[in-house]
Structure formats: C-alpha cells, structure tokens
Image (cartoon, helix red, strand yellow):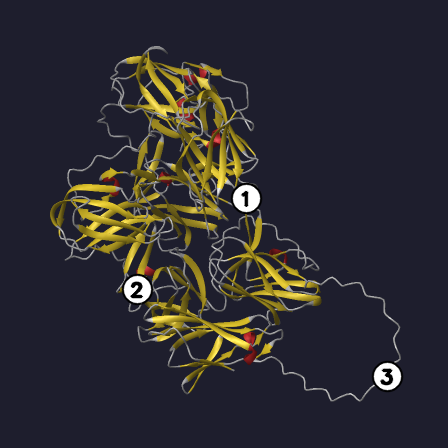
Amino acid sequence: MKRRLAALLSGVLLSSAAIIGFDSTAVTTFAAPKKNPYGIAQAEINFGMSGVEAKTEGDVQYLSSFEQDDYILIKDVDFSKGVDKFYINGRTGGAALVDVRIDSVDGESLGLVRLGNTKGAFKEFNSGNIKEVSGKHDLYFVGKLGNIDFDYWRATPLESTETPEQPEQPEQPASYNPYETLQAENGILTNAETAKEGDTTYVAGIAPGKVVQFNNVEFDGVDKITVTYRSNGPAALEIRDGKLNGPAVATVMLNGTDGQFVTKEFTVKNEVKGTKNLYIFSKKGTFDLDSFSFSKKQGEQPEQPTQPELPSSYNPYETVQAENGAVANAEAKTEGDVTYVAGIKKGSSITYKNVEFDGVDTFTLTYKANGMSVVEVKENGVAGKVIASFKLADTKGQFVTKDFKVKESVSGAKTIVFFGEKGEVDIDSWKANKASEQPEQPTQPETPASYNPYETVEAETGTLANVEAKTEGDVTYVAGIKKGSSITYKNVEFDGVDTFTLTYKANGMSVVEVKENGVAGKVIASFKLADTKGQFVTKDFKVKESVSGAKTIVFFGEKGEVDIDSWKANKASEQPEQPTQPETPASYNPYETVEAETGTLANVEAKTEGNVIYVAGIKKGNLVGFKNVQFDGVDTITVTYRTNGPAWLDVKEGGVAGKTLTTLRLSNTNGQFVTKDFKVTTEITGAKDITFQAQVGEVDLDSWKANKATTPEQPDQPEQPDQPTQPEIPSSYNPYDAVEAETGALSNVETKTEGDVTYVASIKNGSSITYKNVEFDGADKFAITYRSNAAGWLEVKEGGVDGNTVATLRLTGTNGQFVTKEFTVADLKGAKDITITGKVGEVDLDSWKVTKPDQPDQPDQPEQPDQPDQPDQPDQPDQPDQPDQPSPSDAHFDYQINSWGTGYVVNFAVVNDTNENIEGWKVKISKKDVKIDSSWCVNVAEEGDYYVITPLDWNYRIYPNSSAQFGIIGSGSIGDSIEYILE
C-alpha cells in the first residue's frame, strides 16, 4: 500500500513535533489539528497517548505494544456526518480488543473493535455498528485485550452522497525501473479505470479485455515478482512483452483474497533482460491491481518471520496460536497464511505462562502429523501434573482440528507446557473448552424457505443433524456425514430429475442415500462414493426414480464418512450445462504449451477445477483434435494429465484412421495432474492435423507441448534459485560405506534437497549416474535408498551405460517415502567404474551401498598327521563331460493378468533359478490365449499359432537368481491361463 505520510504533515504540524522513545526505530509523533475522521488517520498523529511507543518498519509508521489500559487521544474530531463504523489497521499475534470512547478515557463507549491474529501482517478490522454520535468530540482509543501494533484508524459516515475524487492520470515517464514498486495506475490503461479507497489508488476490475501497459521497462534478469492485489476468486494475471500475444514474461495464478488487498511473491520462470513494453491483463477472472515489482536472484537467506512477542497472559477459551508460546527445540514456520510450530518431538516444548483457567473438559487442537505421535500437556514443566495426553494419528500432511478429553480439570492462573513424547507433530493452535459448555459451533446459515435444485445448493444451507458445518479457505461444507447423520432441505421445487451432481470428499468407501420425506421415505438416489484421497471431487449419480413437485428431501449417511460441499439436480430432458468452449485457434505453435480445451472435442467436454481447465474423460471412442499444427521436428512430447489407472493415448496424424505418430503409455497418477515427457521416434515436420485418441483406460488432459529433436526448446530460465552446492566428485569410492547418489557424475538428472536429504531426482530412461574407481573386494548385495510413486527399474552396469549389467533393481512404488531395499549383485573385485541407469519409470535416489558375501568362520586346522607313503597312483579314468551351461530349461516362467473386460495387460518374467548366467532365451505364447496389440522390453514375431518372444540386447543375459521381465497389452477378453513354451 502507498503511505503518503509526508502529505499529511504541514509546517504547522512540524512546529509542534515531539520525539517519543530513544531506540533506532523511534519516530516523530505530532499534535494533530482539528480532525476529519472520514479518511485514514495515522495513529502516531495524536494529542496524547499512554503506554505506547512509535516505531517504523520500512514505510510503515505505527504505535507499538498497544495493550490493556493504553490509549491515544485525538482532540476536536468533527463527526458532522455521523459514524457507521470505525476501522483500525493493526497487527497482532492473537485476539485483541479496542474500546472507542468520546470526551474522556472513561467516557461514553461508542463501540468495540475486535482484532484477530494477523500472522505478522497489518490488517484492517471494523467495529460493527456504532452508537449515534455527532458534532465535535475528543476521541479516545483504549486498549482492552491483547497486544497491538496500531497503524491507523478511520471512520465511515452514515451516508455519503459525494463522488470520490478520481486521481488524475499521471504523466508517463521515459522509462521504468522494475526493481522498484510500480503503481498500477501509473501505466497506460485500455478499457480499465482507476479507483481510490482511503490512501490506496489502484486499477479496478481487471478482467479479460482490460490492459495496463508500461513501456520502456529496463530489465537485467528476474527471479521473483511481487504483486499487491485483491480478488474475490481465482484469477490469472498475465504479463507479455510488446503485445497481447507477445513473448510471455510471467503468468501468476491469484487466489481469492476475501476483498482485502494482499501482497504476495511469485517465481518467474522466464528469463527477462533488456527493454520491454509490458502488457498486463487478465487471462481468467477479475482482480484489482495496486502495484507490482520484480526482484533479481539474491544470494542471501530469505528473511525469517519475526517471532511474535509473548503475551503476558492467555485466555485459553479463545484460540491460542501455538507460536505465541515460548518455543524450545522447535521453530515457527509460515506456509501461506498459516504460521505454526514445526517439528515438535521428544525434547521439544512450548510454554504458556499465566493461562487463566476456569475449568476444562476438552482441548481443541489444530495439528498435522506424518505418523502416530503423542503430545502431553503438563502443569509447571516436565515434572508437573499431566493435564492431557493427545494421541495423534497420521494426518497425511494436512492440518486437522480435533477435540481431546483432559485427564484432570484445571482452574486458576497456570503455566502449562506442551511436550513432544513420540513421533513428530506440527501445531497451529489450541483452545480449551469448559466442562459445562459445548465448544463454540460455527453460526448456522439461515435455512432458505425453498430451494431451486437446478442451481447449485450449498450443503450447509440445509437443516443439519449430528453433523456440523466447517470452513477451509473459501470452502464451507458439511463435515462428518455418517450413519445417524442427515441434512434436510424443505420445499425443494422439482420438475423431473435424471442425475444428481455431488461435490464431496471421502476417506474411504462410503454411501449416502437421498430420501423423500425422511428416514422411512422413498429412496430417490443412492450415492456410492469412492475414496477421494482427502480432495473434494464433483461427480454425477443416476437417480433411482424421477421426482416432481415441492418435496422435502433428506441426505442420510449410510456407510463410511463423507464431507459434502454442494449438490445439484439435472433434469432428465436436459444435458448438464456445458462450459463455454474456447475459440479454436486457426493454427497452433506446438513448441509453446497448448491447452487441451482449445482443440476440437469429440465425445468429451472441458471442465474446470480451481484454476485448471482440462478435457475430462478421454476414453475409447473419444478424441481431441488440433488443426494446422506447425511442426519443425519433434524429439519428445510433454503431457500434463491425470488418470486413476493405466491408460494409453495415441497421437495420430490426420484423424482416427491416420498414421500413429507416437503412443503415450500413461501410468496411474492417483487422481493428481502430473507432467511427463514421452519419446517420439517418428519425424514430424510441416503443418499437421493431429488428434489425441484413447485406446486403453480413461484420461483427463490439461495441456501438451512438443520439444524439437535437435535442440529441445527449453523454457526461458530465470536466474536460477540457489542450488545446493554440488559435492566434489571423489577420486575413488568405498562401496561398503553408504555412497551418496549426488557424489557421482550426473547425466540428464539433477540433485535436489528436501529438509536434510539431498538426492538425485527423477532418474528415468536416458538418465545415468557414474562412479569411477569403485574399489571392490567381493559383492553379494546391492542396497539402495530410493523413492518412487510407481514401479520403476534401474540397472547397475560395469564401465558405462553400454557396459555389462551387474545388477537389475526392480523397484516398487513407495508412496513418496524414501525406503531402503537390497538386490542381488554380481561378485565384483578390483577397481571398477559403476553406472546406475534408468530403464522404466521415474526414481529418486538418495544413496547406495554394497555388502560382501558372508564368510563362514574357519575352524582351527587340526595338526596334520605324518603322511604315509603314497601308493602307486592308478591310471586316471577319463574325465566325464562337463555339464552344460544353464539354459532356459533351468528357468521358470511367471505371468500376471490384469483384465478390464475389453482389454488386458499381462506382465511376464523369465526367472533364472540357477547359480550361473543364462545366455539367451525364447518364449512362445499361444495366439488362442492372447492377442498382442503392443509390447515392451522384447521383440515379437509370429510363427504359426504362436507369438515368438525374444529378448533385446540388454536383457539377453539373465543373472543368477534374477529375471527378465516384459509385458504386453491386448484387446478383447482373456482367460485366466496362457499356453506357453519356454525354450
């Protein structure tokens, strides 16, 4: 926000200045003239104050530590227009209360201003309704509760007929420095206009078609952009160079701010240097823009959040922010607008002194934990009485709020300490609830007199029984619907129903029934709900019977537990409203991201979730087409998609019957959008019409992009954020101690750091890590610490990527956690160069280690007796023939069938059960049992009634106690057994 303090200070004011305080942050406070209350008034400009101190932070001047019985006085305030509300802009670490009085510090109270925890930022709060006041009065702000940094105050009149003064359009400077704050209203406005609120001038209502332009902006690299804005919902701010469709400078996804201006920082992915003409506009949604600035990459550490000053006492019956206590062996962290105490474990504690208890029945705790954990609350320290013990379940990385029964009630002023006892927990806040009172319930919204079911009905607007409404961010929903819970909606005006659209989340298989007129009524619909992994999803459900007329309907929990956000009925005769299809471009540049919904859709539709628009439900018979795509060679294609199971997309030229350019074999993403690269082996140049067609499974497609074969187009890189220092590559390695993965020579991979773990990220086909001069003295097992979200496959080779394979590491998914597993490795001796290569999937590697074969203890050798004279040796018999080397006949063959009725995937393995290598193998599979449409890791030929499967060069050899694995995809149905011949 812009602070024009200087404009408020006239020469008369300066003549009556008085210095308050002696530290380096002290500022001048001024005796104020007769005061107009209807604009922003700085708190430090007053006629008297008690118990506070003026300070400066950056361009904000304020009164610090405004506490109980502190006050400030402003004389002769002219309330000629009356007062609707008082506003205070302040910063506080917890609940606070300010009394607004007139004529004396103990005079008539006009009303109270209640402030909440602002998480370290200044925020404006209002009083609600105020007693009638007019004429001139001395005005007092008196502290009643909490500790506030008091920035400014203002009042709004009862009525205002004045038109706010519009700021003049400023003269445009010759050039701009983007590393200083640029006020949005100083740009060239197209179809946009400025507005003013208090001392803030901004560009209002930037929606698609409205532009703010800054010419001659002098860049020398960019790392971050800081934007001060407000929005009532998600929006996308786009900045381009030179014109509306010029090169992208930055794209910023903005969240709703509940009508408040906020300042947030975003990473800029593109490299920006030189003189630019910036076009700032909305790609989606509407927002007000106050200012923006850019910053270059800095080497210093990010500023740590200021530790809040500890309160002198606590009211435990209002929410207590965890970080407001004295923290030991843990730290306060901030994520978004949540500040919490992180890493509470054995030896960690948070202490709160002078907690004023008047009986306790339960504690309400907001926390997150990554596993089973225990926190104890004790009176007066480690040896004190245990008041409560919180046994906390894994919350899967999400903050949750739960109630816990106390072991013993507490009264009086106490010092209480939260101790970590087991596991590790992050705590956001806590609150005590008296034995005689129920925890405060959120205000129930007024129930409507009737409902239109063909518009979205918010779940919480019904009558709730045995459930409660909760709010997370900007979503209010009905939580914990289970057996015995219900939501009732009266006077629902139906005119036929075919389907219900339900937005919900569930943590396991659940059932909700919709009945007419109550528990014994007719079942209209039954929703069988799958686990949504803690995310809200929207799905359609067929009704059992159509409904017409005014009805009372009830949603009953029947099984499991569900949270419902909203619902909507769709008539039998009408299709659900389709989102507006974007205009299809005349041509496409495939080397920039192509949004899937901009194509021509056949039997699919575009949907929106949050700020993501995507093409939903691409399956067999569906496609997305893009005409006049201008190709100049392709090496890989990058696809952003999600799926709930294995799937397969063909990219074809010309249409359904066209030439297949590449096939995208997609793994299960567990309902999350992911971005992956796929190799293209076909040369693609010139203008092409291409289609994405599903062959197997079902896919949601967000976007795609082609990368050139010669020099794959890299996105413009910003100045790189600080990377962890690459360790110097050792001259040799001891494989019997843990070898950190990142100490090798990396190819097509990079190191990353999470917490105290540095690892090599995303090892996939074409990636490798080489370790030179590894000093072996025998090897039996190869242990790796890794993580993967799906099955993966690494190979350990001697010499390089084309060397002999000494170990094959077939890895299972670890659900994002690092785990350690052992694999058989060839016996190695001497100095070797070892290379770890990616084959299948994507793996993060932390470290590896080799163990030697166990050597049995040797018994003491007995004393040798004298050797008798040797008898004459008989003639040696002929040596028997040496046994043949192991062959595939010494192996066995395994397979696993996964069928979905119209197709199937079969995974095969040729397993070597011997102690020697098998050199070469062949399998014949009967055509009467399978129909092979595609395969991987093998060659496939046909011979009469059989498919003939032979290995590739790299899996020709099968090591002892190892296997060669491959797979096929087929169409149609399949039985439960397959005839084969292993040769």
Secondary structure of the residue carrying tag 2 is: loop
Q: Residue 656 carries which label?
A: none
State the CA–CA distance, disc 2 to disc 1.
42 Å
Secondary structure of the residue carrying tag 1 is: loop
What residue does disc 1 label? 298
What residue does disc 2 label? 586
Viewer-closest of 961 and 751: 961
Q: What residue type is labelled 3?
A: Pro
Q: What residue type is labelled 2?
A: Ala
Viewer-closest of 695 and 563: 563
Q: In which quarter of the image is the N terminus?
A: top left
State the CA–CA distance, disc 3 to disc 2.
100 Å
Q: Position of residue 816 (x, y in %)?
A: 48, 53
- 274 lies above or below 127: below
Residue lying at the far left in this picture: please name it: 549
State the CA–CA distance, disc 1 to disc 3.
89 Å
Residue 876 in view: yes
Q: Residues within 10 Å of mark 3 (few under 14, many from 20)?
A: few
| 1 or 3: mark nearer the eye | 3
If you read the primary sequence from the N terminus, does the residue marked by circle 2 or circle 1 appear first? 1
